[in-house]
Image: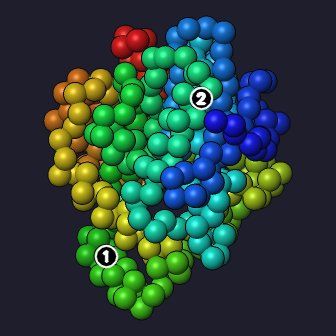
Amino acid sequence: MTYEAAPLFEDAAEAPEGGRANWCVAADGVKVRAAHWATSGDRGTIFVFPGRTEYIEKYGRTVYELRKAGYAALVVDWRGQGLAQRVCKDPAVGHIRHFSDYQLDVVALIAYARSQNLPKPWFLLAHSMGGCIGLRTIIAAAPFNAVAFSAPMWRIQMSRSSAIMAPIAAKISTLLGRQESIAPTQSRVTFIARRHFAGNDLTSDPEMFAYLRRQHEAHPELTLGGPSIGWYLEADRESEAIDDLPSPDLPAIAFVGSDERIVDPERIKTRMSRWPNGELVQIPNGRHELLIEQPHIREMVLQRSLALFSANA
């Protein structure tokens, strides 16, 4: 199969040279972007599943470390974000019709990896929403030898009152045909453009926060605003659905910071407590974006993940 070339902003990503991006078309016709960095080594390939709002270039520095460790890397722009085809009338709003649609992107990504002869064994590094997508993927017996989760979105963190009211409000909005409307309290302007470093929930590293802001300023088309009402409803449904499923017998490690404010840490702790061959690592002073946290945090997360992958090659 021939894949059409797609843009890749390596300068903004600060990624290693030699990356290549292509368009992949999912089974329902939606176009997503994939980028890979091959290697002359034989340690395998690490698939990177990004979180909501994210894009390939955000993982440029992570890819640099993966390549330095001898692995090929493959990163995706999920439908509705990055340069992938947007699925909402308002391109600034993050929307999904059905959460299962992300699995169509996964199938397209795996087909792409095979077409490029990316070296095996294959491993998965999944962050936030990518952790939710990734859990569903590996439960369905995806071809990975091991998986590392960074602050996986196995439930969105909400106050007790919000947890009760949000699904009700979302269902009413759906009945009124407002699934694509931006969710209450959310903004069409991407987080990195409207918030200052002080008090942000993503990272305690000012240099990494500035790295994200530089990417937005250079290529604002990569970034995304808040989620739609429909996205919230679908994310809540998927979180509850996967919570009822057993963890696969696949070596896994999950990281969660003590200062996590985006996803529910208790859901992560509960899941990992019953995961065969699973390990939970709690990180003091870590916020949500552990892969762009303080150097000692991101180095620890990557080194522990790579150790797991090496042990299961």
**Point 74% across, 32% down: residue:** 20
Seen in the picture, residue 83 relative to 3 is either above or below; the reply is below
**Point 45% across, 57% down: residue:** 101
Q: Which mark is residue 126?
A: none
The secondary structure type at the circle numbered 2 is helix
Q: Residue furthest top?
A: 41
Instruction: For residue 200, say whether it is visible.
Output: no
Seen in the picture, residue 100 relative to 136 is either above or below; the reply is below
How crowded is the residue under tag 2: few (<14 C-alpha within 10 Å), some, or many (20+)? Answer: few
Residue 123, located in which quarter of the rendered image?
top left
Instruction: For residue 120, say whether it is visible.
Output: yes
Q: Nearer the viewer, mark 1 or mark 2?
A: 2
Image coordinates of residue 116 in percent, x first then y, are 62, 26
Question: Can you identify the residue that label 1 sits on?
Answer: 167
Three-letter amino acid code at the position of disc 2: Ser
Residue 199, located in which quarter of the rendered image?
bottom right
Q: Nearer the viewer, residue 149 or 88?
A: 88
**Point 37% across, 10% down: residue:** 311
Instruction: Say which quadrant the C terminus sits in.
Output: top left
Image coordinates of residue 229 in percent, x first then y, are 45, 76
Q: Residue furthest bottom?
A: 176
The secondary structure type at the circle numbered 1 is helix
Image coordinates of residue 213 in percent, x first then y, are 73, 51
**Point 74% across, 43% down: residue:** 4
Question: Can you identify the residue that label 2 sits on?
Answer: 115
Seen in the picture, residue 172 relative to 167 is either above or below; the reply is below
Residue 226, located in which quarter of the rendered image?
bottom right
Q: Nearer the viewer, residue 138 or 148?
A: 138
Three-letter amino acid code at the position of disc 1: Pro
Q: Nearer the viewer, residue 68 or 180?
A: 180
